[in-house]
Amino acid sequence: MSLGTSQVFSYPQNSLRFGLLDLKPVEITEDVKFGNVRCKVTKTKLEPTKPVSTFEELVTADNNMIFNSISIPERFNVSDLVKAFTDRSVKLFEEDKALQQEIENTKRLDRNRPFYTFVSFMKQRFEKERDNRLALDAKRFLMSNLPLTFYNQLTRFDNTCYDFLKFIQNTTRIYEYRAKYSRNSKMFTKIIKNMQSELGPIINKFDECAYACTRLRRYVIIWNADTTGDLNWPKFLDIKKIEISEFEQLNQEFNTKLHEIRLMLLNDDTEVLCKISNTPNSTVNMIGNLLGMSSATLNGGS
Amino acid sequence: MVQKARCFFLDANLVLSDILNENNPRLAKLKNDAHLNKIPCYISDSVKNEVKSKVQRTTDFLGTAIRETVYTALVESRDKRKIPSDAPIDFSDVKALEDLFSEYHVMAKRQGSLTGPLMEVEQWSIQFIADKLDKGLTITIDGFLLELTKTVLLNISTIADVCDNLVEFEKGHIKTKVIAVDERVKQIARIAEGYGIHAPDSLHVACVHQYQALKNEQAVFATRDYGIIKQKNGLWERKIHIEISDPLYAFYHF
């Protein structure tokens, strides 16, 4: 199975941070000619708040943090792992012209609702790749002896990513609508700043969870890869090759972060509250019947 | 005389029914009674733990059934028939699964155990293949197992999310009450077990009894398990006064 572009942007935290938070509105004055009349027009545009890091710098920093915080097999060293994972991400980013274009477009002057458009792009892309990500995790489960609960938690994180993007989309829509009708640039700036301060904490919380998830995934992979060439897709993920206490600790940290971001989303947006559909679904029926059985029956059932 | 505050305590089977959004008129009646009469619905943390562990155990049971039981049977059957494993699934593969599940039924009958969970997987997986074959689609063993796993992950992850929303984050009609399991609770649980109320239900009953005593509230433990309900009189004889009822009638026990 090939690794598509979704692998880089499965978790959209870096792109979102860059697109939504690290921009500030600034006023610029342009000379505009209406017929024979020249006049000055003041416009508001969005500029980065700090020197722009390259994507490579951003990913290298993330990977450095990850591989310095977990134990690694003797056959690898930290810098090799950082390089291997960074190179892969950068390659996929460079091939992803649509995303690069979208990030650039966010800073354009003439773009209507730049934040909302950018988040909608990210959400749409995330949604489109959802089935591929699920298939990838299903395949990894079948080529492993790890329990299905492990992959279920990863799928739950995927569900949470989607809820998170929905929330961000909704928030940017509301604020940009208000900003559009602001009386002056001072008001515009204030509304955009309010939006950023509302989104900041939740993006930070999401970052923490995405980091914990990526770290856990990488931990499982590096202990099952024999060479750096295997890091993309180890043949088999064997739980016996993993130090269980560290795995459990990383898993626990991930679950705690997942719990925190879900709670934050639930408190901010009741639309996140999902329900099981009433429409007949043989899988849900089967799971429901299993859940209705006593634990003893289930333990002796296979 | 001041009337004691009233509350419902729910058993795990009712919480699961709520999570699965089942059309359960009995639970709907209890929820309606609670809403109209402003009676809070609680679960003990023992029930919360049972619900969460059931979701987890069911997930791993399904994982093992797909990855080991079904996969091994299909591949072994192909090996015997000298058919490559990447050939599309056909009627012979379905019959191989029939052989596999028949063996389980015979073995279970001999051992006096239940094949319930595996029968559920049997019905579901055979129907899954049948749907593909009926539509004239071709699917390999790997493709079939991949689809099964994807479907389970998609559904069980949503169930786990809804479960957390309801019992962990309390975004519904249920609040969790943390009841310390001290010697008194353990003693009542043991007495309940003596009446045939098995763990963890014995602990749920003991926790509700303890809550009543500590908070001086009147509680009704609502369950669909008639094995527990019928033991109520025995508990009363031992001076363990606790109302246990089907959710349909729970309100009338105050």
Image (cartoon, helix red, strand yellow):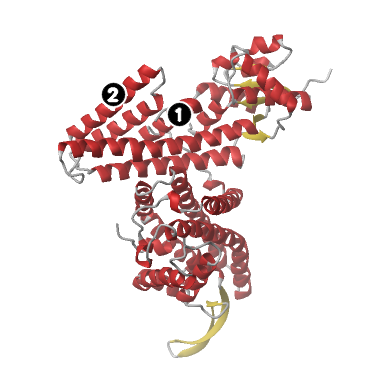
Query: Total number of numbered labels?
Result: 2
- Whether residue B67 can be seen here: yes
- Looking at the picture, how far across and down is residue A228, in whole percent? 38, 67
Q: Nearer the viewer, residue A299 or B38?
A: A299
The residue that label 2 is drawn on is B102
**Residue positioned most to the left:** B82
- Looking at the picture, how far across and down is residue B190, in whole percent? 66, 20
The residue that label 1 is drawn on is A298
Tell me the residue at 22%/43% (across/down): B139
* Separation of marks 2 and 1 at Cα, in angstroms: 18 Å
Work out whether disc 2 and disc 1 sit on a shared chain: no
Tell me: B73 left or right of B113: left
- Looking at the picture, how far across and down is residue A179, in whole percent? 56, 67
Query: Label 2: how many residues lie within 10 Å, few (<14), some (14-19) or many (20+)?
Result: few
Q: Nearer the viewer, residue B225 or A191?
A: B225
Tell which subunit mark 2 falls on. Answer: B
Q: Amino acid at mark 2?
A: Ser
A4 over A78 or under it: above or below: above
User: Quadrant location of the C terminus of chain A?
Assistant: top left
A243 over A82 or under it: above or below: above
- Looking at the picture, how far across and down is residue B27, in whole percent? 55, 24
A260 over A2 or under it: above or below: above
Tell me, for residue A93, which label it has, or none. none
Query: Label 1: how many residues lie within 10 Å, few (<14), some (14-19) or many (20+)?
Result: many
User: Quadrant location of the N terminus of chain A?
Assistant: bottom left
Instruction: Determine the image quadrant of residue B169.
Output: top right
Indicate the secondary structure of the residue bearing disc 2: helix
